[in-house]
Amino acid sequence: MRPLVFEELMLYIDSPKKLAAQLHLIDDQSEADKELKSAVIKEFVPEINHFEKEFLFYTIWLIIRKLDSVVLGSLCFHGEPMDGKVEIGYGLNDQFKGFGYMTEAVHQIIEWTKKRTDIQSIIAETEKLNLQSQNVLLRNDFKELTRDEESIFWELGVK
């Protein structure tokens, strides 16, 4: 995984393919996912002052296959830890689903959070019908906290 610095993040939401070329990676996506682009503009860009001190919580982490430098998807935090909790979100390009890539990426981010003193747990939200995403969390030992009509909320203690 590779976190994007601010300039790379802006290029990514404009054109993932251009960023991939600049970083000598392979990404077939010509444009960023609309939801992701909207979230970056609404949530990350206004936090530019935080970006410099704790940018890892205000950027996208590309998931890159080492074998051939292909961008498989991305993972991000939903801001800095609050009360010891940090929320993650993630997505995988459709052609790479079902191979365990996201399970491994979430595992790596769990290991990274274990090294921080300000994070005691990770939370995540999945849609009720998104069984693949739920399985990623279950394989990483997340426990269901609660659910509503559309979503399931999960948590994993890391301390």
Image: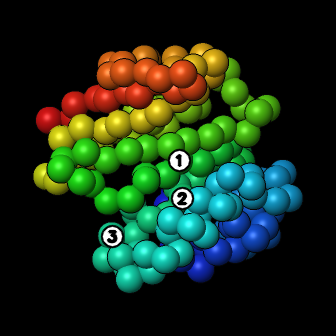
Dot 3, how many residues are within 10 Å of its Cα: few (below 14), some (14-19), or many (20+)?
A: few
Residue at position x 18%, y 41% from top?
120
| Residue 39 picture location, percent across and down | 59, 59
| Residue 80 picture location, percent across and down | 32, 59
Residue toward you, 112 or 136: 136
Q: Is residue 95 found left or right of 102 in the rendered image?
A: right
Q: Which residue is mark 1?
A: 75
Marks 1,2: beta carbons within 8 A: yes
| Residue 88 picture location, percent across and down | 43, 44
Q: Is residue 38 above or below residue 71?
A: below
Residue toward you, 46 or 71: 46
Instruction: State which tag comes first along the sequence, 3 or 2.
Output: 3
Q: Is residue 118 found left or right of 74 in the rendered image?
A: left
* Secondary structure category for the residue under label 1: strand
Q: Is residue 95 above or below residue 119?
A: above
Type of amino acid under label 3: Glu
Q: Is residue 24 above or below residue 74?
A: below
- Determine which of the numbered discs, if any, sits on residue 54 in the image: 3
* Secondary structure category for the residue under label 2: strand
Residue toward you, 6 or 88: 88
Is residue 72 visible in the rendered image? The answer is yes
Type of amino acid under label 2: Ile
Please tell me how many numbered marks the rendered image carries: 3
- Determine which of the numbered discs, if any, sits on residue 60 in the image: 2
The quadrant of the rendering that contains the C terminus is top left
